[in-house]
Amino acid sequence: IGAHFGLFSLAAARIVGPEGAILSFEPLPENYRLLDHNASVNGFRNIHCLPVALGADDGEGRFLVSADPSMGMLTAGQRQPGQRIGEITVEVRRLDSMIGEGELPPPHAVKMDIEGGEVAALAGAANMLSMWRPMLVIELHDTSAAVMRELNRHGYEACLFGSRITIERASGNVHAVAIPSEREDCAELLERF
């Protein structure tokens, strides 16, 4: 989620192999074209590129565009991208809607980097979190406490990469891994990070 030009999508596609599927969400048209091109030129037929943003509601949203193509964001938050150069309208979907309507299979893992839109995207994935219980890797953008509340509500445990600071106390841009509390087979991950 927030695939940019597909670096993590390409790595994940190699890991899961041709039998697995990678769903890459990228609403910025220029990034989407690069993502689709990178998947194609690298021969990954298991990367499915979707030109939508994810949020708490289905509909359209205003997307703030930055001169740095990795810094665009929906206007739902209080943040503004650095070097803002414009605004476009993008399609916004809830993961719960897309899974519930059969457009997507439920995921086993989710990587999210959406510049402050994490809480809205998680709110739009409440059923997914409760029913399908994927592992999560999330870049937080001054949303740590609110994201942790959302994760706690769905029975997830989480930690920051490379830090013993609790997520609630973290500020700025930090990376977290979250696993369903019942996944004893993954509990060691929290200790390693």
Image: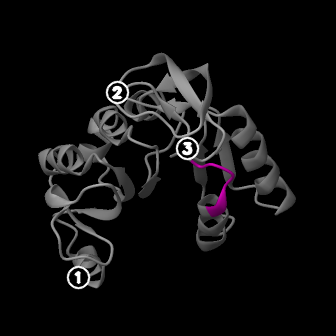
Query: Quadrant of the rendered structure where residue 130 is?
Result: top left
State how far apart marks 2 and 3 are (Cα).
Answer: 20 Å
Task: Please state which amino acid type lies under the numbered disc 2.
Answer: Ala
State how far apart marks 2 and 1 are (Cα).
Answer: 31 Å
At x 52% / y 39%, what residue is drawn?
A: 104
The residue furthest front is 83
Judged by depth in the image, the label closer to the viewer, 3 or 1, is: 3
State how far apart marks 3 and 1 are (Cα).
Answer: 31 Å
Q: Residue at label 1?
A: 191
Q: Is residue 122 above or below residue 89?
A: below
Q: Residue at label 3?
A: 71
Task: Please state which amino acid type lies under the numbered disc 1.
Answer: Glu
Q: Is residue 187 above or below residue 131?
A: below
The tag on residue 56 is: 2
Decide whether the magenta segment is chiefly helix, strand or loop.
Answer: loop
At x 35% / y 42%, what residue is drawn?
A: 118
Residue 28 lies, in percent from the top left, at: 65, 34
Residue 141 lies, in percent from the top left, at: 36, 49
The residue lying toward the viewer, choosing from 82 and 157, is 82
Task: Please state which amino acid type lies under the numbered disc 3.
Answer: Met
| Mark 2, secondary structure of its residue | loop
- Of the numbered discs 2 and 1, the one sitting upstream in the chain is 2
Residue 57 lies, in percent from the top left, at: 38, 21
- Residue range in magenta is 3-7
| Mark 3, secondary structure of its residue | loop
Is residue 83 in the magenta section? no
Query: Quadrant of the rendered structure where residue 126 is?
Result: top left
Dots 3, 1 in contact, CB < 8 A: no
Dots 2, 3 in contact, CB < 8 A: no
Q: Is residue 156 visible?
A: no
- Of the numbered discs 3 and 1, the one sitting upstream in the chain is 3
